[in-house]
Image: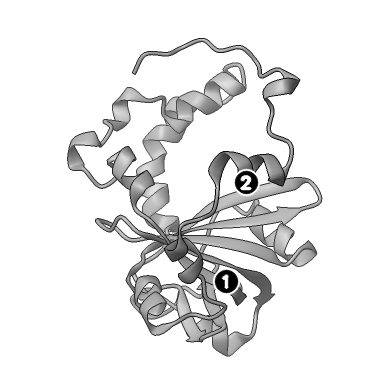
């Protein structure tokens, strides 16, 4: 793809009101409005049950955050038509999303399903539960010994599908578009450059496969 240099927008070309947006884009197509529901319908539940990956967007005093969540399909559990349960699996302990939720409950979810063009969007409000029985119901491992520290409980406000245009344009599920990992800098290389050489990037990269195996849950 050719890179094209652009200049910053002038004030006259900035869109600053909903009226301008409406004038530019017009009315939404009827199906785009009809598909939005205040509950998880049986059809929408099937999308959630089939998804092994969701993006979680949160908001806090410092700004916005969006983080990936993944597990075998069905890991996001539909408790009822207004309630979703998502286990908080082991991560790097930044807990940016969780910090935001305890200060501002608003969340947005985007579910993806490998090979499927449509995505599913869920908007709602979340709390964090450490109720023992609930957390243990999401246990994994050979002896069910890996229990999430907490479970994200989402009360649903709106659910709707997103058309496949973006994924089709991106060719997201086309194997021919997959990128060779070696063409991009490794995390060790990035950390070494950020630290001006103080961080041992080669050692980090060499140890990571085993660290991932040991800490995946």
> How far is disc 1 from disc 2 in space, using C-alphas?
22 Å
Q: Hey, which quadrant is residue 156 in on the image?
A: bottom right
The N terminus is located in which quarter?
top left
In the picture, measured across the screen, residue 144 lies left or right of residue 99, that is left
Q: Nearer the viewer, mark 1 or mark 2?
A: 2
Camera-nearest residue between 37 and 167: 37
Q: Disc 2 designates what residue?
A: 22
Q: Secondary structure at mark 1?
A: strand
Camera-nearest residue between 176 and 157: 157
Q: Disc 1 designates what residue?
A: 158
The C terminus is located in which quarter?
bottom left
Q: Secondary structure at mark 2?
A: helix
In the picture, measured across the screen, residue 46 lies left or right of residue 101, that is left
Name the spot of residue 89 as percent of width and height, x first. 51, 65
Q: Hey, which quadrant is residue 73 in on the image?
A: bottom left
Name the spot of residue 70 as percent of width and height, x first. 42, 61
Name the spot of residue 111 as percent of width and height, x first. 43, 62
Neighbourhood count class around disc 2 (C-alpha, 10 Å): few under 14, some 14–19, many 20 upward: few
Say which residue appears at 40% left-offset and 39% top-offset: 207
135 w.r.t. 216: above or below? below
Looking at the image, tell me whether mark 1 or mark 2 is earlier in sequence order: 2
Name the spot of residue 5 as percent of width and height, x first. 51, 10
In the picture, measured across the screen, residue 72 lies left or right of residue 154, that is left
Q: Hey, which quadrant is residue 16 in on the image?
A: top right
59 w.r.t. 177: above or below? below
Say which residue appears at 54% left-offset and 23% top-offset: 192
Q: Which mark is residue 102?
A: none
């Amino acid at each position: 793809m050719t890179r094209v240099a652009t200049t910053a927008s002038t004030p006259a070309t900035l869109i600053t009101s909903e009226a301008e947006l409406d004038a530019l884009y017009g009315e939404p197509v009827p199906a785009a409005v009809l598909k939005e529901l205040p509950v998880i319908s049986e059809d929408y539940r099937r999308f959630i049950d089939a998804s092994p990956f969701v993006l979680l967007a949160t908001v806090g005093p410092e700004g916005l955050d969006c983080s990936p969540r993944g597990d075998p399909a069905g890991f996001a559990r539909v408790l009822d038509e207004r309630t979703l349960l998502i286990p908080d699996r082991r991560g790097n302990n930044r807990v940016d999303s969780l910090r935001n939720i305890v200060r501002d409950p608003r969340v947005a979810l985007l579910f993806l399903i490998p090979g499927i063009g449509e995505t599913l969007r869920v908007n709602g409000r979340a709390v964090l539960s450490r109720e023992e029985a609930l957390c243990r119901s999401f246990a994994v491992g050979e002896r069910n010994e890996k229990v999430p520290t907490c479970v994200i409980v989402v009360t649903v406000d709106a659910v709707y599908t997103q058309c496949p245009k973006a994924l089709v344009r991106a060719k997201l599920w086309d194997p021919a578009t997959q990128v060779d990992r070696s063409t991009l800098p490794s995390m060790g290389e990035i950390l070494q450059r950020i630290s001006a050489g103080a961080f041992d990037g080669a050692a980090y990269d060499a140890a990571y496969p085993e660290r991932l195996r040991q800490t995946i849950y």
